[in-house]
Amino acid sequence: MKKSLLIILLVFIFQINAQEKTVPVFKDGEAQVVEAFSHSKNWIRHDLWVETSFDSDGDGKLDRVHVDVTRPNQTETEGLKLPVVYESSPYYAGVASGGKELFWNVKHEFGEKVAEPTRSNVKRRGKRPIISNSQIKTWVPRGYIVVHSSSPGTGLSDGSPTVGGDNESLAPKAVIEWLNGKAKGYASRTGNEEVKAFWSTGKVGMTGTSYNGTIPLAAATTGVEGLEAIIPIAPNTSYYHYYRSNGLVRSPGGYLGEDIDVLYDFIHSGKEENRARNNKVVRDTELVNGMDRATGDYNDFWAGRDYLNEMQPMKAALLMSHGFNDWNVMPEHSYRIYKKASEMGLPTQIFYHQNGHGGPPPITMMNRWFTRYLHGVENGVENDAKAWIVRENDKRDAPTSYENYPNPSAKPVTFYLNPGAPGAGTLSTEKPSSNTKETLVDNYSFSSDALAQADYTNHRLLYVTPVLKEDVHISGLSTITIKAASSKPAVNLSVYLVSLPWNKGRRAKITDNIITRGWADLQNYKSLTKSKPLKPGKFYEMTFTLQPDDQIIKKGQQIGLMIFSSDNNYTLLPKPGTELTVDLENTSITIPIVDGSNGIKY
């Protein structure tokens, strides 16, 4: 009898203790903020070094990457195991400072050899154990552990930056393997005292913006076990697409003259004693010799820094986020990966907004994604709409859902060019009957904005539709086929799709004027891998896509196709005077419009 009473008492005590343990709470398919997880003074913060599988600084020892951890104290006091939200970055320890001298000179003729930019060093900042505070306030109170790491060759991590090289994929892979007990972590950079991730369930989700959004994709392409879901925000998915465009040397918006070697210098905050060797082996040999600013052609160097080529092993669920008006890391970066992941049968969603660089999905979308794939709660997120787009006048946290992106109802509509230079010609679905050619004169002194607003100018060609009587919904990638001749062996080619009349008001929205745009090198009319000097006066035909878009052009506006040469915010800027002649009969643009030609009313 006494024994039975003792057993009952023990069971009762056990149940009380079990009830007192803190656990994540879920409601409507989302992890909720738990009061016991929310007291920052009780969070446990510590750092360590994870050993990788590579030696990218050539010191004869495997590189170790610096990692920090922020976790609820219940992971220590109650034996609680939780999944991890992980962000990695090359920026945490600081970046180079300086002016235009750090960038390549862009005012020169095509193929002309110019002096390298001024090289700079980064002074490391930051104190242990805190690498970053990002993600912590959002995810720790909801029942996650947050982990950060510094990329190779930055902060207190060993190694060298490679800007898209293999070590930048293998470094986060090692951290994820450590979180799964398959790699070794150490209490110090050079010591042998091991640190175990006993508090981790082994399920990891990654997120981050820009370069920090590239790294989750880089890790996912390794197929590492335990990386269940990624949410890249405005990620650079191909360094060729970041620094080149259809064979053209083209800078990211806001960073005229930047190239991959400049970015290397910008982030190289690691050991000062290793920098001379890293610079010689990585920057001055691999990067400078491979990037080819002379032709802008796609080569093995660029192919090795294009994550689309590495996706086969990927298993992680993918929620992409990007802005349609991000002219730094352009919206094609997310679309090309989303499209491939969908074709591979991976769980995918894409969130697009109408603003510029950065901008995560609404917290409820991210929460549902991580709840499903990290906590394993069957919330049906995989059955939600695949595409979420913030409409032009809506708030970022109120996107409209669509079956997919591009909108499945969008159909290609081809527009042809009718003459009108130096004023505006017409853009029509009727093919012109006469073979007309029109010529523009390159002059980088005029901005694209000024060219679009000019009533008359010989520095661009402009073709516009009649005034729209109803809204027109564009969704997808526009494609231009252009037949043109240059007066010189090389010429910049810039193509904009604009909404007119141009809104110059102080309250003009980012969607008011630019619909989409693209750039190309006519020398690459046959292939991105092989450019060939143009014969002056000879016509060449080239087809390429503009940046993805999903935009509603309001009634009362006109859609305009603007063709010009040097773009003083993006391209090389050769001496003005090159003539570019366009054969209108053999030039057209195909625009994806919801309901096709029925979606256009004049």
Image (cartoon, rainbow, N blue to C red):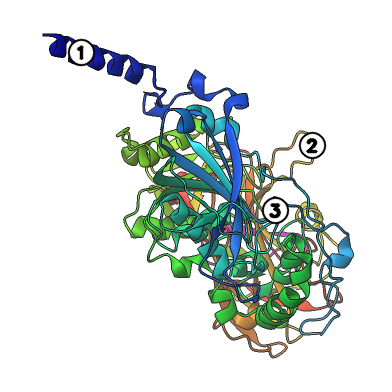
Please tell me whether residue 134 belongs to the stretch shown in magenta. Answer: no
Q: Nearer the viewer, mark 2 or mark 3?
A: 3
Indicate left or right for 316 with 296 as reference: left
Which residue has dot 3 on it? 91
Q: Which residues are magenta?
A: 419-431
Please state the horizontal and vertical placement of residue 307, each as a whole percent of the image: 50, 65
Please state the horizontal and vertical placement of residue 190, each as a whole percent of the image: 63, 61
The numbered disc on residue 6 is 1
**How many angstroms separate mark 1 from mark 2 (CA)?**
81 Å
Residue sitting at x 42%, y 28%:
78
Q: Is residue 583 visible?
A: yes
Which residue has dot 2 on it? 505
Q: Nearer the viewer, mark 1 or mark 2?
A: 1
**How many angstroms separate mark 2 from mark 3 (CA)?**
36 Å
Please tell me whether residue 428 belongs to the stretch shown in magenta. Answer: yes
Indicate left or right for 347 with 140 as reference: left
**How many angstroms separate mark 1 from mark 3 (CA)?**
59 Å
Labels 2 & 3 near each other (Cβ < 8 A): no
Q: Amino acid at mark 3?
A: Tyr
Residue sitting at x 41%, y 32%:
80
Q: Residues within 10 Å of mark 1 (few under 14, many from 20)?
A: few
Q: Nearer the viewer, mark 1 or mark 3?
A: 1
Q: Quadrant of residue 371?
A: top left
- For the C terminus, the image quarter is top right
Please state the horizontal and vertical placement of residue 315, each as a whole percent of the image: 36, 56
Q: Quadrant of residue 280?
A: bottom right
